[in-house]
Amino acid sequence: MDIHEILKYLPHRYPFLLVDRVISIEPGKEITALKNVSVNEPFFTGHFPYHPVMPGVLIVEALAQAAAILSFKTMGTLPDGNSVYYFVGIDGVRFKKPVMPGDQLILKASITRHAQGLWKYAARAEVDGMLVTQAQLMCTLRTV
């Protein structure tokens, strides 16, 4: 999926859209997506200006956005103005290595459970094949 299709599945926009491309997706199972980390990201001006590091919470948010795309593809639907896909929980998050400008963040999420409107995922982010972040994520779709 290119950025134009991603924009159909996520309500986020710059500077909070954190998925640039979907590399592969198997609805009902897993997704692999990427985020190109640029020195021009607005958070780098304040998050260690002399040693820029991508904030861990934004890495986790990028994983949640990839998971949301997987969920919508699995449901065979697009989000609409009457619903919001909420991030409702994180367990076991671990940050293994800093993510720096110039890195290509590979986002992977697999569905571990889906019941009663609650989605659970095993998620991991990698740079150059090395694990940088892992977590179990929980999300839900709600009508607003």
Image (tube, grey):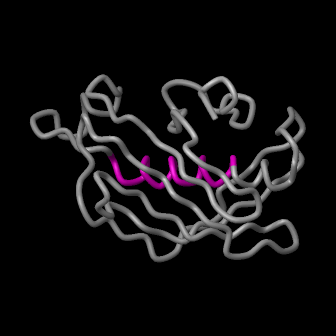
x and y percent of residue 89 in the render? 61, 67
Most extreme residue toward the left, as rendered?
50
x and y percent of residue 122 in the render? 56, 70
Figure quadrant of residue 35: top left
Figure quadrant of residue 97: bottom left
Residue 60 in magenta stretch: yes
Does residue 46 lie above or below 4 as drawn? Answer: below
x and y percent of residue 4 in the render? 66, 23
Does residue 25 lie above or below 37 as drawn? Answer: below
From the viewer's side, name the closer residue of 122 and 84: 122
Say whether residue 42 is left or right of residue 3.
Answer: left
> Magenta region, mostly helix, strand or loop?
helix
Say whether residue 95 is left or right of residue 51.
Answer: right
Q: Residue at x 54, y 52 (%)?
A: 32
From the viewer's side, name the closer residue of 80 and 104: 104
Q: Residue at x 79, y 72 (%)?
A: 114
The quadrant of the picture occupied by the N terminus is top right
x and y percent of residue 44 in the render? 27, 32
From the viewer's side, name the closer residue of 88 and 133: 133
Q: Which residues are magenta?
A: 55-69
